Each structure stands twice: as C-alpha cells, then as structure tokens.
Amino acid sequence: MWDNPSLRCLLAIAFLHLLSLIYSQETGKSTPGNWKCITHDLNRMICSWDATSSANRGLTYKICQFRAAAIKTPVSAVAGNDFECMLFFLVSFQALIPLTPQILNLSADFSTYTLYLTWNDSGSVFQHELDASCTILSRSGFNVFPINYDSKLTGKDSILFWNWTSDIPLECTSYYVKIRCYINELYFTGRKEWSEWSPVRTVPEKDTKPNSVMVFPQDKVVLVGSNVTFCCLYNEGKSVKFMKYGSESYPLLRLSKWSSAIKVQNVSASVPSGTNVWCSLVPDDVEGTVLFVGYAPDTPQNLNCETRTFITITCSWNPGRPTALYSKRRTKYILFERISRENVTCKVEELNKKHACDFPVHANQKIYNFTLSASNPLGQAESSLLIDVNQRVHLETPDKFTVSTNSSTHAHLSWYIPGNFIKIRLLCQIEISNSNSERQLQNVSMAGAENSNYRAWVDALHPYGTYTFRVRCSASEYFWKWSKWSEGKKLTTLEAPPARGPDIWRQRSPVGETVTVFWKPLLLSEANGIILSHEVVCYLRERMLKAHEVPVPLNSTEIKLGGNDCLISVIAKNRAGSSPPSRITSVDLPSDNVKTELAIATGNGIYISWHSDPNVTCGYTLKWCISSGSEPCNVDWEMFPSNAIDAVIKSALFQPGVRYNFSLYGCKHNGYQLLQNITGYMKELPPKVAPNFTVEETSSDSILVKWEDIPVEDCQGFLKGYILYFAKGEKGSSKTSFMEEGSPELTVKNITDLTKKSLRILGLQGKTSYRLDLRAYTVGGIGPSKDLYVVTKENSVGLIIAILIPVAVAVVLGVVTSILCYQKREWIKETFYPDIPNPENSKALQFQKNICEGNTALKTLEMNPCTPNSVEVVETRSTVLKIEDTEIISPVADSELPEDGSETGTGSHVVVSYCPPIIEEEISSPPIDEPVGSSQVIYIDIQSMYQPQVNPEEEPEINFVTTAGYKPQMQLPINAMKMESHSPTEEDLDKIAGYRPQANTNVWKLNSPDSPVSIQSNNENGSFGSPCSINSRQFLIPPKDYEDSPTPNNTGWSFTHFFQNKPND
Amino acid sequence: CDLRRKLVIVFPAGDSWGIFAFLCAALWNLPAIPALNSTDEVGAGQSIQKTYDLTRYLEHQLRTLASTYLNYLGPPFNEPDFNPPRMTRAEMVPSATVDFELWRSLNDNARLAANYRAYTHLLCYLRSMDGQVAKAELRKNLGHFCTSLQGLVVSIASVMSSLGYPLPSPLGSASPTWAQGPGATSPHNDFLKKMDDFWLLKELQTWLWRSAKDFNRLKKKVPPAALMLRLEMRGF
C-alpha cells in the first residue's frame, strides 16, 4: 500500500494539516514557553514546552488536536483545585530528527588494514521507503576522516555495513568511529535535522599506551613496487631517533603521542632474509620488523608430464620469474588431476632448483587432466595439461646390458628396463659401431613386460669384427622420447676362413732356376681372422710338386723349379680354415726389343700407358719395386684387364722426387711376357743440387764453362736443361741471386741440349770480374744455383799503346820544335830578345800581361788607364850620372821619385811612350810619416812571417825602391847589384843599363817559370815579390828557401800534366 | 634436544683413529713416564688439550660464519657499530655475561658444568636456526659448524668424566628461559628472531673465548702428558 506514491502524497498532506492546526487557547494564563514538536518517525510527534512559571503549578496540560478545518489546537490546562480550563492556540513548525543510530559492531582486520562497521538503520519506524544519509566520522590519532553513506530505509530494520581500508597499519594508532543520520523526506515541509551522534566506538578496543616498543606491520609480504607505511609504537617518555628501511633513513611522520611512521614508496625485492625496518629510540632501544617484498608466482612454464615406469607420472615445469620469497613464503605447488580429483603437493628441491612432481598412475585411467597451481602469499597462478599416459612414455635407461656371441656373424643382446609396460609395445634401437667408428642402427620391436629383461639378436656381422653395442628404447605405438643410451658393450665375433686367396706374383731368377713367389696380405675384411700362414704349392700338370708353408709375416718364398715350369698356387690360412687358392704360372715368355718409356707424374700418382697387345688374353701386370734404404726392394704389382691401356698407379709408399721403374707384363695363354719398361715420378721436383761446373778457359773477352751431369737421384725429375746466368760482379760483393738483384747486365742462357756439357761465353770485357750461375731444371722447377766468379784476362797491348803513343808524340813535337827553334833562332831572338826591345811591339810584354791578367798586384803592366807619357832620352852616355843621381837621391821617399823622374827627364832626347804604373795606394800614403807603411799595409803578414829575412830598418832604401812604382831606367841595375851577391861586369852593366820594364822586378818572379828574370833572380827579398792574391795570405810561389830547386818542380808539374791529359789522349 | 643420546656417535671417523692412535701411544709410553701414575690424568690432559684446540678452531670457524650470517640478516645486523641493548627476551640465548670475578671464583667443576650446559643449549638453538635459513650455502656452513660444536660438547663431557666430575643434570622448571630451548616462549616475529640469531652468534663468540681461557687454565692445572703424546694429539 505504501508503494503507491499518490497515496503517500495524500497522507503527507493530511499529516501536515494535522500539525498546522495544533493551537492553544489562552484562558487568562500565560502561554507555555519554548513550545517544540519533533518527530522521529513521521508518525508520532513529541512536543515539549517549558512550565517554569509557579503560577502554572498544578496546571494540567491537555493537547488538543484539530483535524482538517480546525484552526487552533487547544491545550487544556486543568488546575488542580478549580478545574479551570484554559485554551492556548500554538502554531509552530515541526522538525524531523531520525533516531540516533546504534553501532552494532566495529571490528578491524589488521592484516588488510580494514575497519568493519555495522549499525541498525531503524527503518521499521517509518511506514514507507525513505532516503537516508549517514555520516561516519572516524579519527585516527590527529586525523579525522568524515565519510558519507547513503542508504534507503525500507520500513524494516536493516543492518548496514561499512568498511574502510587504511593505508597505514591499524596497530599504528587507535581509530574512533561515530555515526549520525539524516532522513531526506521530500514532502516533509518541516525542518529536517541530523540525528544525534552515536556513542564512539574504538579500535583496538583498548585505547591504551603500548607496553613495549613495536614496529608495524610485522612480517608483512608485499608486492614489488608497493608503497608501505611503517610505524613505531613506543612508551611515553621515549622518542624516536630515526627509522630505517634497510640501510636507508626516512623522514618521520608523527601519528600520535606514541606513534611515528615512515612511508616507503615503490619497494624493491627484498634479500632472502627479508628487509629489516627498525626504529631506534632514545633512550637506547631498538625495535624492528621485517618486510618481505617479492612477486606473485609466475605461471608455471613448459609443464610436461610423462611416465617412465607406468607407476608414476612425473610432471616437470619451469617456475618462470623468481618470486624473491623464501622459506615459508616461497611458492608452493599443488598438482591437481581433474578426472580422479586427486591432488599432490609438490616438493621443490631448492638446491638443484628442480621443479618436478610425481602423480600415481591409476590402473584404469588413460587420460589425465593436470592442473598445476602455484601459490605464495602474494598470489597464485596455474597451468594445465591434458595427456594420454600411453603417449607420454619416456623409458628409463636400459640397464644390465649384456652382449654375447657364439658365431662369426651373430650377437645376442639383453637388457633390463624397470616399469610395467604390459599394455604397450616397446621399440628399441640397437647401435652397432665397428672398429672404424662406422655406426649402424637396427630397430627391434617387442612386447612390453613388467620389470623384465628384453632380448634381441643382430646378424650380418663380419667375422672377427670388433663391435660396440648400445641400446635405447621407447614406446612403439606412440613415440614420445627415446630413453638415454645404455652403456656401450664391446664384442668380437668369431673367426671364419679367409674370403679369398691373396694377390700373387712371381719373378724368375735371371738364370731361370728358381722362381720367387710374392703375395699381398689380405685386407682385414677379407682375412676374417688372423692369418697364420700361407701355403705355396707348385703343380706340374695337376701333380703337386712341392708345398711350402710360409708363416706370417713373410710374404714371399723361393721355389726351385729344377728346369720345369709349374703352376703356383697360394692359400692363406687362419684358425678357422683356408682361403680359396690363387694361381699363377711360372712361365716367362721371351721378349725382345723392350723399350723404356717415360711415365707422367700426376702429383699423387704415376700415369702409365701402353699399347694394347692383342695376344694378351688374361690381363696385364704392372710390377715395380720400392726400395727403402739399404734393404732389398719390396716388389709390388697391380693387375689390369686385357682391354686396359693405361693406369694411374698410386701407392702410399711413393714419394715425390723419387724415380720408380715399372715393368709391364702381358699375360698370354702360355705365360707372362715383359712388354715394356717404364720409368717415372709420382711428382717431379726441382733438382736437389746444382750442377758441378768449372771454368775451363779464360781470355780477355770470353770464358769457357764446363759442367758435369747431376746424379739421377739428385735430379728429382726428368732433367729439361740448364740455365746459365752471368753478369759483372765482384766476389763477396753480393750474396743474393741474380734474379733478386735484377741486375741490368744479367745475361741468361738456356741450354736445352742435355748432351752439351760446355759453353763458351763471348763478348766479355777484359780484366773484369764476372759472376756465373748455373742451374739445372726439371718440370718441377729450377734447382739450386752454384756461383762462380771469374776475372777475364787483361788486354796488355792496349795499355802499352796507350802509354807509348803520347810519349812518341811528345818526343816528336819536341824534336820538331827544337829544329824549328834552331833554324829560326835569329827570328826568335829578334822577336823575343831584341837588343833594343820595342815596348809597343814587344810580344813578351803582351805575353806577360796576358799571364798576369786579373792579378791586381801587377799594376805596372796595366794598360787600360794608360796615359802615354813621353820620356825623352837625351844622352845614353849619361847613365852613369844618372846612376849617381839616383844613388844620391835614393834615400828620398819613393813617392817623390816619379816627380823627380819627370823633372829630371825634361831634357831628354828620345821620347819613349810608356805607361806609368798605377800605384795609387803607395802614392797616397805619405812616405815620410811611415817609411814602410805602404808595404806594410799590403804585406803586413808577409813581413811578420818573414821578419828574420827582411829587416826594413837595415835596408829601407831597397824597400822604397822595390815597392816604388816607376823607376828611372838607370836605377834598377844599381839596386840589383846591391841585392845580388856577385858583382856585375861592365857588359852586364851596359846591358842592364838599357831599357828595363817599368814593373817592379820582384813582380816578375811570379811569371811563368820560363821567365828569365824569375829564374835568374836570387833576390833575398824575393818573398816580397812573390805573387800574392790580395784576398789570400798565401804565396802563389813559395819563398826562396823553399824553391832552391825549381827545376824538379817544373818536371813534377809536367809529369802530372801528362797524366792528367792522358785520358784525353 | 636430546644430546646425550647422540654422544656415542658424534666422534667423526678421523677422531676415532686419532683417539686410537693416542691410546696406543699412551700405552706404549706409560712405563717411560714416571710422573704419571694414573691413566686418568693422561686422559684428562689429552682431553683438555683437545678441547682447547677444538675451541680455538671453533672460534676461527665462527668468525667466518658470523660474517656470512650477519650479512645474510642484512642491515643493521651487519653494521659494525650495531650494538642493541640486550632485552629480557634475548634470554632465549644463554648469556655468557657473568661477572668475571664471579666466574673466577667458581671451581673447575662448576665452570665446566656451565660450559657444558651453555653449549648444549647454544647447539640446540643453532640447530633450530639452521632450518629457517633461506640460503642453501649458508645452511651447509651452519650444519658444519653445528657438527663441530657438537664435538666440543662431547669433548667437554669427556674432560669432565676424565676429571671425575659428574655431568650436569638437566635443568628443572626453575631454569632460565633459554634452557627450555627455542620455541618455548611466545612466537617471535622475524625481526626478533634475527635479533636472537645476532645474540646467539655474539654469545657463542664470548663463550668460545672464555672457554679457551678456561681450558688453558685447566691445562696448566692438570699435569701435561709427555711431549710426544702432545705431538700425537696435534696431528689429529
């Protein structure tokens, strides 16, 4: 009925009218004060008023209620005595205040930090549905958390629940919770007010100080990356010094008077023993807790279940990411099988990290649906696997494996496999390895049994073969996995008679009295055991002549024929029996004109070819002999069919560079015939040695070289020729070969004619050293070299001619010159030594000038700045006077001499042009101030060098004269006389008194040695006159002391000159 | 923690041979040692020397083990300056912090008995510790140390018997908390367990140090056996 909204509305309006019409009627008494009406249930109204007035004592209040149209509600006050009734009309608005909610229970889950609150909504007090809203106020320490909770009142009492999760452990501080409600009735026009607060409830209930220091949360396990708040509770009077998470300190948060906290964000995985969180207090105290941070278990990966014995199914898996949780917090695994609804708790071995679990096999169950669940305090994960146990058989390694045989080709095998395989068939694989490590696999299928031995046999083994056997097994029908291989067992089969007769050959002695029979040892696969001996029998027309039993290891025997040829038979014998016989005839057919041919080396064999012989009916045999050292050579042979015409012979014994000889025999119906001899190499190499060569003959332009053959064993191949290198070269100058040097004069001669043993080298230079180098070569290459140095002979005739011709020419020239000079002596005298020389035409002067060209010291003969002066010769006879004058004025300074000369010369008759000497330096220097100054300036070093010889103070005048430029013609002889030790004769004086060249006489000394003055002059002061470069301090011509014998100097010069010119000749 | 039952089997193979060799040598040398008038004294001297050597060896072994174990516990236990106050609940571990003068005033018998009792309980505690270690390697080391410590308990017992002292009787209900063995008190949280382990190692160190001194003093009191025998002993 209450669900109808229109009806509800109607009722609410009616109630409103009811309330509004309450009034009181005053009957002369005062109106009751503080009139108030409230309702808790919209049904009953509770009104209250003050009745404090004493006058009203004894009054009885009666509340009247007017319905619908009534205006006022009369309140009847009935007095005790006179029963007087008064009516008050009171009009007021009313209030809706819900009943105070009652908290039924407040509980806490400390592990999840959650508070649970239950209260009664008292909905039964209302007749219809109403919207209600409650406020829950909780307080922890200093913090208050108001929470609104909306509900619906249904008209019945309901228990309401509310929970709240804290972010800090609940132990850290007490929680106070109270509640009040409010009813939101839309049609109620009066005041709607909150109910009273419920009584406060506390969690934990005993809101007291902690007894001891404690840190919360204790031993909690959280996920990596969580944010965790730790709090430290302590007694009053203590204070927290610090709180650390691991080794790191965090800022403290004050929760209450005896609680502080730290907040750690994003925690990382803890160490195996957990991360310690501890609180250090003042006074000295420490308390802590351990936080375990890890991961929820990963989904088990690669879950694999299989059975090995059909007794249990073993499931193994990979746990995936480590959880970082250990001991009691580690991941626990439970294997659950859905069909049988059984589960098994798995033990994980921490040491080897093996994750496996065994589940029993049920007799009548084939299909198993496994679920492996992993769980730890942080969560759980699972993975599933559905298997048919028959298809997941992984057998144990076959055990007790034995191998035995009683034949040469069979072996019996036996092994044991634990487990019950009655329901399936097994497939086993037997591995047979022979001594050459060749593997062969043989599969055997067999019925399964329970904990049984299994047997198999193998055949087709080789007699006397050593084999290693192994076995492994699996389920036959549904292959899953092979078991591991069993251990290997070795077995040697029994012997059997040799499979065939040996390869044989025979060789008759040169005389033919005996024949030697050779055979090759049988291969291991053919011998079928250990060959003990060979039986050699000689048959003559089916009649056995002789039998030889030859023990191993001999592989040949000699048989005396006694003039008869026979058929030789050889049989190999081992413990098990004899081989079929091998036969060969001893008959050798005569052969003539047997040629020797060369084989071709192939590098790893020898290629031999031959011409097919139509008479050969039973094949060819190629025989050779390999000798090693001093022992007799080992005969070897190879047989070829009749149609063969070539073969490549290979043998491990062949060595490169060694010559082998082969004989080719043809097998004809009546015997063997030697057809051909062949020689060859497996591989040709360069010759091992150089040819031994000598120089037979040497001339000035040719050399004759001779060499010897290289021994065959040193050739290492077929010799193709020789190469001779020669070039100029000194012995010991270079050790390197010609090719390396790359000498430009290298000459190479290739001698391909092997019969030639000498060579003449022409066109060489005389007396020259040559280096010769001779090498032999084969197809394999050029052999080593041998050096020889040869010096060609000297060409003596040429040298003699080279000397004689210039000498002869010189002599002839000398003779001719002498004759000419003699014939023309008058002209020469006239020209060169006239009695009165003409200065202008004097060739001698020009000659002199030419020679001294460039020498600044010879200023007298300088012609260029020549100012012609005229000397007038007045009288030739006055020379004596002149001499006297000169003598008188000689002490006068030489600088004045030219002026005196010119003055004295004013009255001369003959005018001779001459060039005054250019002696500016001497003229410019004042002679009076420094009498020897001029000469000192120029020749200062000369003077210092020759001081003892020259004393300027003793003979100053001489110096003046000698250093002066122009001198009067008469003055010089006097000076000369003074200087020379011998006294000149009158004639000499006359001659000398004539013309003298104006140059300083000393200067003439530097003239060419054929200059007469220079030769004749013995002047003591010759040193001063020695030509000297101004720039140099050396004499060009040494002083007199050093040129006592000028002639040898001259000869020496000419001799050198001769040799210097010789090359030009 | 029934140690007594195990006493008969704790001699390792090597030790048995050593004792056998020692006995042979002792018998051989008896006529030559006039100072020794009873085999008991020879046995006591040897036992004391052996116990002393074992104590020193355990001291050395503990140094390595403690360093590894404290690192396993993590900070603050592996911090060198960590020295928490010993709280009442730390009496889970028998304390060696007896007054020095008081200890010296005890007679040999009382000291040996205290040693015996302490190591018996330390060993029991050590064994319980073993099962909780998360690291296999550390568990192995702990197991090895336990075996050695068990050897020491047996040695002390043999010293006491050779000196004619009775083995101490099991402690009654009036015994301290630690005597009841681990797990006798209220369940610990992990931090307190770590703290107990820390104290155990510390106490072990102190006990071993003091035992070495005790046995050294005792060695001097009991006439030493012949030098040759001593050498035999050291070769074990």
Image (spheres, coloured by chain):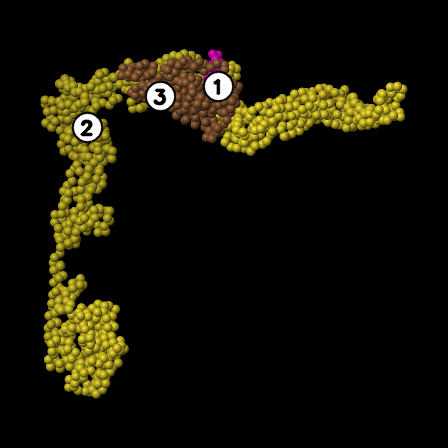
Chain colours: A yellow, B brown
Report the amino acid beneath label 1: Trp
Q: Which residues are magenta?
A: A357-369
User: Dot 2: what SS?
Assistant: strand
Q: Is residue A107 above or below residue A1046?
A: above
The residue under label 3 is B220
Mark-to-mark CA distance, 2 and 1: 97 Å
Residue A142 on the magenta segment: no
Q: Is residue B28 visible?
A: no
**Residue under pointer 2:** A636
Q: Is residue A205 left or right of residue A272?
A: right
Q: Subunit of mark 1?
A: B
As helix, strand or loop, the secondary structure at mark 1 comes to helix
Disc 1 to disc 3, C-alpha distance: 32 Å
Q: Residue at x 13, y 76 (%)?
A: A980
Q: Who's the residue at 56% across and 30% down the image?
A: A239
Q: Is residue A365 magenta?
A: yes
Quadrant where the N terminus of chain A sits is top right
